[in-house]
Amino acid sequence: MTLFVELLGCLAGVLTSVAYFPQIVKLLKTKQAAGISIPMYFCSLTGCALWFFYGVIINSIALIIFNIINISSAFVVIILSVKYQKVSSNNL
């Protein structure tokens, strides 16, 4: 049962982590951040950080690894969004 639960956590982690990549790719390709909600990604980053600390407390490798990826991905989206919002406003 423990192996199944850990595998289920890994599957959830992979799907959650992959969800950030299309947004990152779009930001890098278009260099435009119109319509990106920075507060939403900040909330996501904060939630993932809390899940990471919870994973450390309960010693869950799945929570630790995938939330490190999620925190990094959310941070990248925030940084790119801020960068490309500034670029867009400079072009006006």
Image: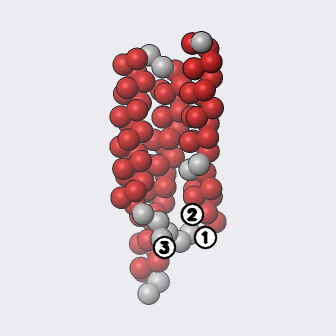
Density class for disc 1 (Cα within 10 Å; few <14, some 14-19, many ≥20) is: few
User: Residue 10: percent from the left, percent from the top?
Assistant: 60, 28
Say the numbered circle drawn on residue 34.
3
State the separation of the CA atoms marked 2 and 1. 5 Å
Residue type at numbered disc 2 = Leu
Q: Name the residue under label 1.
A: 30
Give the quarter of the image for residue 46.
Answer: top left
Q: For the N terminus, which image quadrant? A: top right
User: Residue 69: percent from the left, percent from the top?
Assistant: 53, 38
With 56 as the anchor, is 6 left or right in this view?
right
Q: Do the residues labelled 2 and 1 touch (CB within 8 Å)?
A: yes
Q: Do the residues labelled 3 and 2 touch (CB within 8 Å)?
A: no
User: Residue at the spot x=38%, y=36% of the render?
Assistant: 49
User: Residue at the spot x=41%, y=47% of the render?
Assistant: 44
Number of residue marks? 3
Q: Which residue, as the protein is rendered here, is positioned at the far front?
A: 1
Density class for disc 3 (Cα within 10 Å; few <14, some 14-19, many ≥20) is: few
Say the numbered circle drawn on residue 27.
2
In the figure, 48 relative to 37: above or below?
A: above
User: Residue 22: percent from the left, percent from the top?
Assistant: 62, 56
